[in-house]
Amino acid sequence: MKNKHIGLFFGTFNPIHIGHLILGNHIAEFGSVDEVWYVITPQSPFKQKASMLENHHRYELVYRATENYPKLKASKIEFDMPQPNYTSKTLEKLLEQYPDYKFHLIMGEDNLASFKKWKNYDYILEHHHIIVCPRIHNKNVPSELKHHAKVQYVDVPIVEISASFIRTAISNQQNIKPLLPEKVWAYIDEMNFYR
């Protein structure tokens, strides 16, 4: 399909949870994009974290979470890119692979507030639209970004769930099954992750 519009949702997804799915599905169904791709950020070799699952496990979780949603996809495009990686490089690589697609960045308002600190942020803004999801706590977004022609605020359900909360709860043997897609919980449980 030519000129497909793809929303890119970047994250470690450690683990992916229902908040991520609600947001991505809402943008795919009611927003201005045809699909949402969950771009899994690889674990940096410079910042090894014990609580971070290996890349292929986090990809498996995202794949399982999205496989029944035709408009949602798991992407491991960043896995083979040199580290540390920057979003602008990922966008360049995606455009090389899919020259007819239009890529839109999905981000929280907190990321937009610090967007000018991103490497090549001006290049990103020139070539891509940004879909901004509001947060419960307002952030001081610079006016020129908030009202920029390429920045679009979307009205999405705000679900404040953190992956770190989920990891801690699992390690404390507390039941957080309602916060995870069923297949994601089954894989975490089977593999004994975060315990």
Image (cartoon, helix red, strand yellow):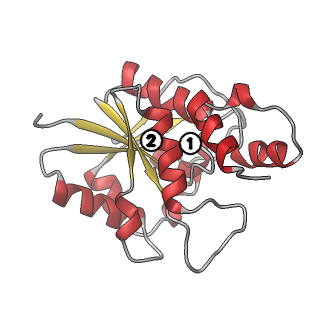
Q: Secondary structure at mark 2?
A: helix
Query: Which residue matches tag 1?
Result: 108
Q: Is residue 79 visible?
A: yes
Q: Quadrant of the N terminus?
A: top left
Q: Nearer the viewer, residue 1 or 104?
A: 1
Image x and y of residue 27, in percent = 42, 27
Cα gap from disc 1 to disc 2, whole angstroms? 22 Å
Residue 114 placement: quadrant: bottom right
Left of 175 or right of it: where is 35?
Answer: left
Percent across and percent down for residue 61 are 53, 44
Residue 107 in view here: no
Decide: is 147 above or below 121. above
| Residue located farthest toward the front when viewing the structure as drawn | 190
- Residue at x 80%, y 44% (from the top left corner): 170
Disc 1 and disc 2 in contact, CB within 8 angstroms? no
- Does residue 93 appear to the left or right of 116 in the view shown? left
Horizontal relation, residue 193 to residue 38: left or right: right
The percent coordinates of residue 136 (x first, y second) are 70, 32
Per the image, the residue denoted by label 2 is 63
Which element is circle 1 on?
strand
Quadrant housing residue 185: top right
**Residue displayed at 41% across by 65% down:** 79
